[in-house]
Every structure is written in structure tokens, then in C-alpha cells.
Image (cartoon, helix red, strand yellow):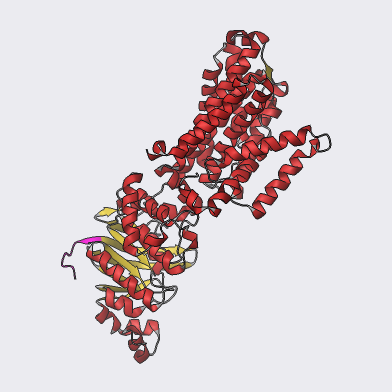
Amino acid sequence: MHTLKSPFFWIVLIVLSALAALPVLTNSTAMREDMFLILMLMILASSINIIMGYTGYVSFGHIVFFGLGGYVAFFLTREFQVHFVLAALVGGICASTIAFLIGLPVLRLRGAYFALATIGINEAFRAFFTNFEPWGGSVGMFFNIAVYDAYGGAKNAGQLAYYAMVGLALVTVATSFLIKKSRFGLGLMAIREDQDAAMVLGVHPARYKVITYTISAFFPAMAGAIFFFKNGLIEPGPAFELHRSIEALVMVMLGGYGTVTGPIVGAIVYERLRGFLITDPTLSNAHLVIAGVMLLLIVLFMTAGVVGWVRQRVPALRRYLE
Amino acid sequence: MNTNDAVILRVENVSKRFGGLLALDRVTLSVKQGEIFGIIGPNGAGKTTLFNVINGVYPPTEGRIFFRGEDVTNLPPYELARRGLARTFQVVRPLGELTVRENVIAGACFGREHLPLEKAERIADEMIEFVGLGARKEMLASKLNVAQKKRLELARALAARPIVLLLDEVLAGLNPHEISDMLTVIRQIREQGITILMIEHLMHAIMNLSDRVFVLDYGAQIAEGTPQEVSNNPRVIEAYLGDPDVARRFLEGTV
């Protein structure tokens, strides 16, 4: 495992931990809320990057796993008082199982057809949960405030949820790193570059893609579970919100498609920018427009994203900067 | 010439039909261990289709293929790669956004020996030196010129440690100097004991290199034998040019 010997791997994890520790050390709730959101988006973007950046399959509707994990975990905690971390794990496993089953047929599609299919899957699940009365239908489900008593009250539960999100972000980034630097990851990138050539080299594309899709569904599902646990309320709209998927794609493109640190940089920059726009009275309604324009500019002029651009400009860094 | 006569690859009565087009018409051939087996034929004769059928890109419409005694007829390409069949493409297919080194490592990782990364890296470095791309190891594959891309394909195929190597026009598009370098490389590969099947348009090259030559025309075999026999075969001459005299000079490589 030479990834574990790579200093850059540890630097990334340490910097990330330090950032995550800031709100705790300064005891700032506002900063913690910001950071919670950034970490969540980082998890989403990194997961999309595994299937999109490494493998070349644009999973437009990846948010479906966020919603699925959220719903399953929320239900378990609400009905059976299952500890939220355990519930999140179960949510992750459910989402991965569904990804595995959907992946078998859907990953045969190439290019735009795959992207469209993933949107369809997200919309189908949203419609299902909107009509699934046992789980609240269109109104969704909410926690009785007593649910948080087991975690020392709502305030404390929020803190615990934050720690869980930090842990999950670290695991997600580490996984992304390990995949990128492994033989498996090389197989994925071979598929991305030329699936038919990869197959002749000895890569089993169908197997590789399904495994990857399954992994990439796990982390958003757990993030959804933690997010809605803290939120105390889950509804089909916010759970399967397509524009969050699109924003995560923008983050991947902005930071650098196919790099490990790209989605991290992308999530931070995008979220800071959005925070600024939303609080500005004249621009607050325009943040999605700006996201769209940004995506357009990146696709046209900076296809490699921030991290990719640095890698291209400074080839000496290519060995270290992933 | 290798004296070991064991058949390593056998194609038996293989046909391939695309809609109304019969691209391969009951082709039968046997390749012996350690030889260089040349495949020639006019454009559109079905040479690349034959390669695609042998390495599992297309299943044959009928017929069987045996590799080292095993029936591999409907196996997908990655299964054949694992068994020791590697190939290069007529139209080069580098993994463009990966470096030269990563391309070759992929060859070693997923090929016959299915090596873990560290070992694959060592073999990749060896192969890159062998084909003379050492100075361009860290370059993106898409940035190479055609001759370098051909060498890359060769290194990638060799890194898989194949038993049989299919070379699809590795000389096309190279200048005379690059061709003579490549011929040296191919001879060295054969000396390592790897059996080579090669498709080539450059007659003097294939006539010089091959132990046996197989001629396809309109998907069917029209001749097989030593380069000498084939170049004197009237059917080959006719298929190529129609004019026996010009054709003979062409096949002997004096044109």
C-alpha cells in the first residue's frame, strides 16, 4: 500500500482535520454550521468524483443515495431508537445495495444516456417517497424532540452529528485516495480513457464499474443520514433535490475532475462563494445562475479545474498533488 | 527459426458476418510456438476482423478458436488477456490522460500475471526502456507522436507478459528510420520466446520477418506458406495487383 506511505495523503487528512477542529476549538456554532455543510458537500462531490472523475460516468442524479440513506436511517432512529451512527451505516448499506442492483443494467449505458438514466432514477425515488404514506408521503417524517434525549439533548446531538460528519468526510477522502492510487483505480481510469482498449488490456469493465458505483453510493447515503438526523425532519423535496447534485458536479469540475483534492477544494470554494452570494441582498436569488455560468466557464476554459490546472502548469507537482 | 512445432493458437473454420457482409469466410490457421506469423492481404480483406475475433472483441459467427489447447471461442477480451494474449491496435489507442508509465503499468497489472502495482511498476519501467521511451515516461500518452504511440502500445502489450502477441500494423505511419528500429524490437521480442502474429502492409518487412505468411482476400484464405512460397503464388499476385510482373517485384519488396 504505497498510498499510506505518501506524505501528501497524510497532509490532506491532517489539514482537513485541522479545518474541522476550528469551530470546535473556537466554540463557534455559526462556523460549525458552515463547516458541517462544507463537509457534507465535500463527501457528495468526492463520491461523485469516484464514479465520474475516475471512471468517466457522469452520475447526474447521485443525490438519490443521499435521500435514500437519509430516509432509511431516519426511519430506524425514529421508530426503533437505533443509534444514529448505526442507522447511518444501515442507510449506507441499503443505498449501496440499490446502487449495485441498479448499476448492473444502467452502467451498460454510455455517456449522456447514463447521465439521463441517473436523473430518472432520482426522480423515480422522489416520486416513490412522495407517495409512500408509511414514511410520511409528501409531508415526510419528523423527530419527536425526545429522540435527542438519548444523545444529551438537541444541542449535544448537533455536536455529535458534526463529529460524525467530520469522521465520514475523512473516511471518504481516504477512500478516494486509496482507490485513485490502487490497481483498481488504474483500471477505472483505463475504462474512463477507452473502455474497449481497457477490456483488451484485461480489465473487466462491468465488474469494475458496478463495484465503483456501489462504493460511491455509500458515502452520500451516510451523509444524508447524518444530515437529516441533525435536521430532525425529512421530506422528499430536500432529500432528492436534483440541484444539489448539480452543485456537487460544479464543485468537482471547479476543483478538478479526477483528482483527489479537487472535490475538496471545489466544495470549499463553491460553498464560500454561495454563502457570500446568498447573504448579499441583490445576488441572493442568483446563486444558481452563477453556478451555471461558472460550470460553463470551467467547461469552456478550465476543463481540468483548479487542482488539474496546477498539475498541468507545474509538472513537478504531478507526483505529489493528487 | 524455432524448431518447436507445438501449435499455440488454432483458428478453425471461423466465419464472421456483419449483416450482409461476410468479413471472414471459414478461415483456418495454426500458429506454432515461437514463430512470427505474418498476415497480409489487400485493404478490407478482413485482417483486423480476424484479430478482433481471435482476441474476443467480436464473437465469431461460426467456427472455434483454441489457445494453448483450450477452447476460447466466446471468451471476452479480458479473459484472453489473462490467459496470455496481448495486442496492439491498428489505430493507436493510448489511454490519453494517463502518463506513458501509467499506460504500461496498466498493461502489467491486468495482463497474464495480474501483478500488484509495485511489481507492475518495475516491469513497466523495463518495458519502457526496452522500446526506448525512457525519456518520456512521465509524459501524458496523448502528447506523444505517432511513432512513440506505437512504441507505447508495444510496451503496454509486452508488459502483460503475453504468450502470444498480436501486432496490427505497428509499422504503418513510421518513417524508414523508425521502421528499422521497430523491426529490431520485434526480433528481440521473438527472441524472448513470444509468439507473434502480425498484420502488415509493408511487404519487405513482413517477408523478412515472418516464418510463415498467411494471405487473406475478401475474408478467405488464398495462400499460406513461407514468404518465398507466398510471393510466388499466382493467386496472391492476382489478388494484389493483377499484373504478375509488378506484383512479384512488389511482394519481393523491390518497389
Q: Is residue A131 above or below residue A106?
A: above
Q: Residue at x 49, y 30 (%)?
A: A171
Quarter of the image holding residue A66?
A: top right
Residue found at x 62% / y 40%: A266
Secondary structure mostly taken by the magenta-highlighted segment of the chain: loop
Q: Percent from the top left, x then y, of residue B105? A: 38, 51
Q: Quadrant of the C terminus of chain B?
A: bottom left
Kindly give the residue lying farthest to the front in the view shown: A26
Closer to us: A275 or B197: A275
Q: The N terminus of chain B lies in which quarter of the figure?
A: bottom left
Q: Is residue A100 visible?
A: no
**How far from the left and from the top, in percent, is residue B92?**
45, 64
Q: Residue at x 68, y 35 (%)?
A: A272
Give the residues in magenta: B1-8
Is residue A246 at least partly visible in the picture? yes
| x and y percentages locating residue B124 in the rendered image | 34, 54
Horizontally, residue A254 falls left or right of residue B105, namely right
Quadrant assignment, res B46: bottom left
User: Would you say residue A55 sits in the magenta stretch?
Assistant: no
Depth check, front residue: B24 or A84: A84
